Amino acid sequence: MRSCSSFQRHSQSHLGHFRARRSSSLIVAKTSCRFRSGSLSPELNGSKSNVSRTHGYQLQYTAVQVGAFNDDFDIASFDNWSDDEGTVGYMVSSSEGEESDGEIVLNSISDTDLPSVFVSNNDALTLTAHRLAMIGRARRRHRIKLGLFINLGLITFLTVLLLFVDWCAWKIVRLPLAPFYLTRPFFISAVLVSCAGYICVPLLKSLKIRQIIRKEGPARHSRKGRTPTMGGLFFVPIGIAVTIATVGFSSLQVSGASAATLAIALIGLIDDVICLVKNHSSGLSAWSRLILEVAVGTWFSFWLDATSIPSPYGMKMLVPLPAPLGLLFLGKFYLLLTSFTFVSMGNGVNLTDGLDGLAGGTAALAFIGMSIAVLPICSELSIFGASMAGACVGFLLHNRYRASVFMGDTGSLALGGALASMAACTGMFFPLFVSSGIFVVEASSVIMQVLYFKITKHLLGGGRRLFRMAPFHHHLELCGLKEPMIVAGAYVISSVLALFAGYVGLIAA
């Protein structure tokens, strides 16, 4: 392989020559090289120049086009290229016949053939800029199409489902309901949040309220460090406001659920603000946040116990379950279950919020599943769920792949608290855990990872990991699955779980 090493030394000397002239230059060449024993004869696209012989090998050169960039050119923009989209493709093959030691072909992937002669600096700069612009447009079109395709599929499914529920809602409730009872608040929230995003997202960006990326996460997530966060500040209040405007303050369940959602959103807001002030990925300590979440859940439990909430069962502290289980009376354990649900749902949504659109889309599906489940018990609370689902869908317009804003702990904790309050007001805990199956899996993966590591460290002397990384969506990323594919798969699974949760809630009520 003396030919290969000789060619590498010669190539490195030329590259060093170009880098010495200007360190920010971009060298673009379209080359096809073939190595054979006894000779090295590159076949080049373009005019041939001087020929030199070194150690009996023939080396042939071609004109290489150099385009210089200004000093403010952002090299980080190349980070958006995926691993399989590099500019150079490599092929290595070997042959046993004849006198061939091997064959290496280097092909530059381009959308424009380079001229075969040297051109002026202005022409080189123009051509290079054109090539980069075309690459950026192709990536942008691919990104927009993929994100919109997933979003449109989710919106279509939710719209069809809500229209079907509205069409047969009188059979479920056995009372006349207003036309488009659930579809109307869903679309009002979606439109208002999507419009508000065009004002709030640039505002968050101008205030430099950016996401702090954890160093322990996947390496490719480092490019999300410039994305603004705390999107929950504009989509959570809009979802609650649309509910209040539709229902009013006559429903105690809706008022209590709205208050609990804002209270636990405040915990997330404090956590986000501390992260920004400390410029660190961790805000509140784990114990501090846990205590605050338990406090909100306990307050809501005592409020339920002290308030006369109308119930079709004539008494509270009941959990409806499908036949043959029927109604399950929990008594004071109902209060403990409520506190546990607030903590588990809030942290479940927070752990799921690691990919673009993952938490928002699955939360929207969980809200719709719960809206169907609680419809026979409290129809006003169904409007709350539909409105929050619409707020999540409107937020997805800005949070889809690739995200322009993240919801932060302000949004993720609020969504978990809203789901927990819907279940606590109606006793629909079983449909809640079914419709929130993605959140349960994500939270369980973290618990399993920690327990497995501690057990193996105690028994084997060295900790081992059950997953490559927790939560589970990071494990799938490291297994090679692309981010949009993981999100789309989660949407499909959540759609099935939402349908099943709604069905279980209807037959249990």
Image (spheres, rainbow, N blue to C red):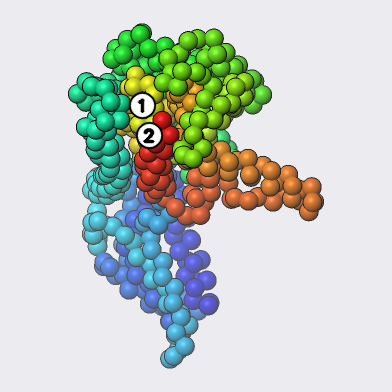
Image x and y of residue 237, in percent: 38, 16
SS at badge 2: helix
Residue indicated by mark 2: 506
Please name the residue shown 43% across and 91% down the image: 98
**Left or right of 477, for residue 216:** right
Dot 1, how many residues are within 10 Å of its Cα: few (below 14), some (14-19), or many (20+)?
A: many
Of the pair 508 and 211, the residue shown nearer to us? 508
The reply to whether the C-beta atoms of the residues labelled 2 and 1 are less than 8 Å apart is yes
Q: Is residue 274 above or below residue 350?
A: above
Please name the residue shown 63% across and 44% down the image: 448
Image x and y of residue 305, in percent: 55, 13
Please name the residue shown 52% across and 14% down the image: 304
Of the pair 411 and 444, the residue shown nearer to us? 444
Residue indicated by mark 1: 376
User: Residue 45's mark?
Assistant: none
Image x and y of residue 282, in percent: 59, 27
